[in-house]
Image (cartoon, helix red, strand yellow):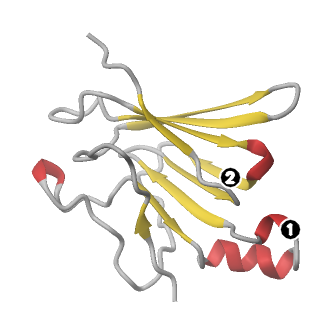
């Protein structure tokens, strides 16, 4: 059974993000997969956006769905975590993960015993317009971006 949990942060998330920006960089030793969740674009949203950075050496796969207003994610039969307080209390928490999702099981069947599948997590980043899914064997680094004045 698939269980989704909030990705823990050192800061409070009490709103939804409007959009997600995605970029990749290639360094000499490694690259990064970077996301910016745009919370500041939402009326009554957060005052800072969140940057998410994955080391690409630990990313097995990712999917980006732009303007995904009609997309149906397969999140299993159990509920997903909600924000739980404030103006957006009933909205799905925008950073969730699972260690036993359908996508991970598909990769396990296709690439049996691949070393990156050990400890692999399925991360989902949700906004009002976009969805990004990442399979990675290492947690991302999460940071609040400086507030824009």
Front residue of 59 and 19? 59
Please tell me whether residue 110 is drawn above or below residue 37 in the rendered image: below
* Vertical position of residue 21 compared to residue 5: above or below: above
Outermost residue toward the top in this view: 149
Residue 133, position in %: x, y? 58, 55
What's the distance in space between the residues labelled 1 and 2, CA to CA? Answer: 17 Å
Which image quarter is the C terminus in? top left
Give the residue at x 80% y 46%: 57
Q: Residue at x 32, y 68 (%)?
A: 81
Does dot 2 land on a helix, a strand or a loop? strand
Dots 1, 2 in contact, CB < 8 A: no
In the image, farthest residue toward the left: 86
Image check: 13 left or right of 88?
Answer: right
For residue 113, what is the image quadrant?
Answer: bottom right
Q: Nearer the viewer, residue 144 or 22?
A: 144
Mark 2 neighbour class, 10 Å CA radius: few under 14, some 14 to 19, many 20 or more: some
Residue indicated by mark 1? 115
Based on the displayed image, in which of its 4 quarters is residue 48 positioned? top left
Q: Residues within 10 Å of mark 1 (few under 14, many from 20)?
A: few
Which of 77 and 12 lies nearest the eye of the viewer?
A: 12
Q: Residue at x 59, y 53 (%)?
A: 139
In this view, the mark in front (1 or 2): 1
Between discs 1 and 2, the one toward the N terminus: 2
Residue 12 image offset from top left, x and y in percent: 26, 45
Q: Residue at x 82, y 34 (%)?
A: 30
Residue 25 - label:
none
Using the image, determine if residue 146 lies above or below residue 54. Answer: above
Q: Residue furthest bottom?
A: 1
Q: Position of residue 52 (x, y in %)?
A: 53, 39
Q: Which residue is denoted by mark 2 in the rendering?
A: 62
Asked if residue 122 is positioned above or below residue 32 in the image, the reply reads: below
Residue 97: image location, x then y, percent: 50, 64
């Amino acid at each position: 059974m698939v269980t989704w949990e909030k990705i823990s942060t050192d800061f409070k998330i009490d709103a939804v993000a409007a959009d997600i920006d995605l970029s990749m960089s290639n360094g000499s030793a490694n690259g990064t997969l970077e996301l910016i969740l745009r919370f500041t674009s939402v009326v009554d949203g957060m005052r800072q956006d969140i940057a998410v950075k994955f080391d690409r050496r630990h990313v097995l796969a990712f999917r980006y769905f732009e303007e995904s207003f009609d997309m149906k994610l397969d999140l299993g039969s159990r509920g997903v975590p909600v924000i739980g307080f404030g103006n957006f209390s009933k909205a799905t928490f925008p950073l969730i993960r699972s260690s036993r999702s359908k996508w991970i099981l598909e990769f396990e069947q296709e690439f049996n015993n691949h070393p990156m599948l050990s400890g692999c997590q399925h991360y989902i980043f949700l906004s009002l317009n976009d969805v990004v899914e990442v399979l990675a064997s290492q947690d991302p680094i999460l940071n609040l971006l400086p507030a824009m004045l």
